[in-house]
Image (spheres, helix red, strand yellow):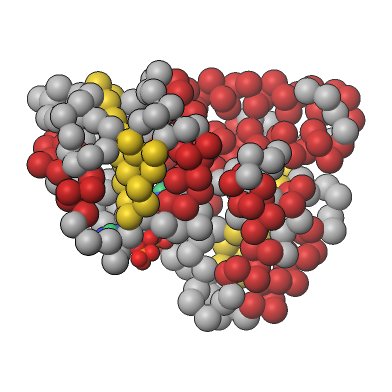
């Protein structure tokens, strides 16, 4: 655990909120089982032996079972082809006992990740990775959104962060995190700047942020002297050794609210995934929760 004793910022703790979401999800699982006799099921596909991915997938599977859902684990060798991965996704897509499908990323380089994502039917896309789900989310149409940015939005709401009219900066433009994050903030009426590896004068842009989301994948990347006084800082990064993308102690000196790593965004991602899987199951089984 990072030291949190000598800073002025308040912590945005994801753990109690995630626990409440998991408890509500467990109740929904129970209601679905009573109404239909079916147990909501999440299939996770892991390709290769990436250690961090294996840990994330194990965590998702364990949490699934804790809330009473079934978890179906599919593991493919690292030298699998796009076609082999697509065949697995299609099998799960047509299996009525599977309600949600997640492909753990990253997948090994030669695989066409986009093609694999697109093979997930919209109804089972519980991590909002298909172009259909992303497009619908951007347009404010019903769809299950990407879990990490959706979990971050829940955390910001829980801590009463004003987004309407706020200046927000997102660092990172990946399709699973930075991009959907920026869209969700725009939908919440923030004015958003989306930064990436080609951005010039990053510290200057960051210093304008009332709300900053770091999703870079580089340990301790965001520096304390980049931060606007009293900014709200969300660290989505999760690097080796439980280190975030934000230099926690320096940034916490200036911020008003900050997420810890671990214990901030991570638990919210998994809780959101479980909740969205149960909601997907209810929709597929036509149960009114
Ligand atoms: P990613 O696909 O590698 O994307 C990283 C983004 O950061 C890219 O858009 C990249 O820009 C940008 N970037 C890289 N170097 C930069 C620099 N020097 N200045 C500005 N931008 C820079 O990573 P990701 O999948 O979005 O994940 C980001 C972080 O979030 C990682 O630490 C990951 O472990 C963590 N994560 C956490 C959770 C969770 O549940 N807690 C879930 C998912 C991811 P380009 O586009 O120009 O290359």
Say which residue appears at 68% left-offset and 64% top-offset: 118
User: For this rendering, which residue is in front, 73 or 267?
Assistant: 267
Figure quadrant of the C terminus: top right
- Location of residue 157 with respect to 286 vertically, above or below: above
Quadrant of the displayed image that contains ligand 1: bottom left
Q: Residue at x 12, y 30 (%)?
A: 253
- Residue at 41% x, 57% y is 173
Q: Quadrant of residue 144?
A: top right
Q: Quadrant location of residue 94?
A: bottom right
Q: Nearer the viewer, residue 5 or 192?
A: 192
Tell me if residue 172 comes above or below residue 28 in the rendering: below
Counting from the top left corner in percent of width and height, residue 156 is at 41, 27
Query: Can I make out residue 96 in this image?
Result: yes
Q: Is residue 15 left or right of residue 70?
A: left
Residue 204 on image: x %, y %: 17, 49
* Number of numbered markers: 0
Q: Quadrant of the N terminus?
A: top left
Where in the figure is residue 138, as x and y percent of width and height?
59, 46
Q: Position of residue 22 (x, y in %)?
A: 58, 27
Q: Is residue 155 left or right of residue 275?
A: left
């Amino acid at each position: 655990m990072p030291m949190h004793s000598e800073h002025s910022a308040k912590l945005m703790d994801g753990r109690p909120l995630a626990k409440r979401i998991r408890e509500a999800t467990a109740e929904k699982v129970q209601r679905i089982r009573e109404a239909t006799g079916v147990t909501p099921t999440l299939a996770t596909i892991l390709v290769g032996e990436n250690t961090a991915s294996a840990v994330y997938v194990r965590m998702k599977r364990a949490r699934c079972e804790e809330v009473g859902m079934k978890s179906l684990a599919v593991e493919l060798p690292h030298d699998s082809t796009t076609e082999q991965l697509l065949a697995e996704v299609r099998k799960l897509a047509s299996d009525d006992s599977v309600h949600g499908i997640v492909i753990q990323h990253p997948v090994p380089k030669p695989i066409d990740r986009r093609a694999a994502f697109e093979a997930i039917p919209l109804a089972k896309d519980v991590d909002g990775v298909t172009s259909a789900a992303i497009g619908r989310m951007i347009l404010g149409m019903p769809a299950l959104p990407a879990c990490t940015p959706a979990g971050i939005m829940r955390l910001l709401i829980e801590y009463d962060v004003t987004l309407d009219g706020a200046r927000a900066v997102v660092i990172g433009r990946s399709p699973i995190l930075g991009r959907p994050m920026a869209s969700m903030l725009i939908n919440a009426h923030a004015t958003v700047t989306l930064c990436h590896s080609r951005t010039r004068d990053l510290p200057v842009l960051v210093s304008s942020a009332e709300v900053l989301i770091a999703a870079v994948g580089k340990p301790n990347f965001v520096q304390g002297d980049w931060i606007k006084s009293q900014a709200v800082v969300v660290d989505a990064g999760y690097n080796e050794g439980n280190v975030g993308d934000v230099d926690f102690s320096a940034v916490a000196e200036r911020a008003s609210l900050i997420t810890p790593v671990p214990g901030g965004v991570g638990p919210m991602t998994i809780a959101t995934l479980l909740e969205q899987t149960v909601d997907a199951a209810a929709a597929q089984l036509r149960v009114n929760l």
